[in-house]
Image (cartoon, rainbow, N blue to C red):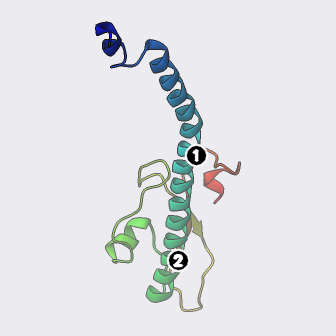
Amino acid sequence: MKPGAAGRNRGFTLVEMMVVISIMLILLAVAMPIYSRSVVRKREESLRQNLETMNKVIVQYTLDKKKAPKSLEDLKQAHYLKEIPEDITGRNDTWVTDEDESTMVPEQTETGVSGVHSGSNQTAIDGTAYSSW
C-alpha cells in the first residue's frame, strides 16, 4: 500500500459535503411550508373548539340561571369555565361578545351575552375571516 492512499480515504470531499447539504436544504424547503400549514390548522381547530365550548356554556348558563351572562368573566366566576381560553390572537381579552335583547326561555329575567366570536381581523386557510366563525 502506498502511504498517501490511506490518508485520502478517511474523509469526505468538499463536493460530497456540498451535495449532501444541498439535498438537506431542498428537503427542508419542501417540509417547512407543510409544517407551518399544519401549525395554523391546529390553531384554527383549537379556535373552533373554544368557540363551540364557550357558546354552549353561554346557553347553559342562561338556562341554569334564567339570565344571560353580562360578560365572559361571569362564566368564569360562576365556574362554567375554568379560564377564558385564548383567542387565535394568543390573548384572552380579544373575544367579541354578541349582545342580544331576546330571551331563550320565558323565565329569563335579564338579557346579555348570547354568543362569542374571535376578535381577530385575520383570515383562515379557507379564506373566511376568523371573526365570522
Q: Position of residue 99 (x, y in %)?
A: 57, 66
Camera-nearest residue between 41 and 74: 41
Camera-nearest residue between 12 and 85: 12
SS at circle 1? helix
In the rendered image, which residue does mark 1 sit on? 37
Camera-nearest residue between 34 and 107: 34
Q: Residue at x 59, y 91 (%)?
A: 106
Q: Amino acid at mark 1?
A: Arg
Q: Neighbour class for label 1 at 10 Å: few (<14), some, many (≥20)?
A: few
Camera-nearest residue between 127 and 64: 127
Can you name the residue that lies furthest to the bottom here? 107
Can you name the residue that lies furthest to the front here? 1
* 68 left or right of 102 in image: left
Which numbered tag is attached to residue 82?
none
In this view, 25 is above or below 9? below
Q: Amino acid at mark 2?
A: Lys
Q: Residue at x 38, y 72 (%)?
A: 81
Mark-to-mark CA distance, 2 and 1: 29 Å
Q: Residue at x 63, y 77 (%)?
A: 102
Query: Which numbered disc flags the more N-terminal residue, 2 or 1?
Result: 1
Q: Quadrant of the N terminus?
A: top left
Q: Residue at x 43, y 49 (%)?
A: 90
Q: Position of residue 124 (x, y in %)?
A: 64, 49
Can you name the residue that lies furthest to the right here? 127
In the rendered image, which residue does mark 2 sit on? 56
Q: How many marks?
A: 2
Q: Position of residue 72 (x, y in %)?
A: 43, 66
SS at circle 2? helix
* 73 left or right of 126 in image: left
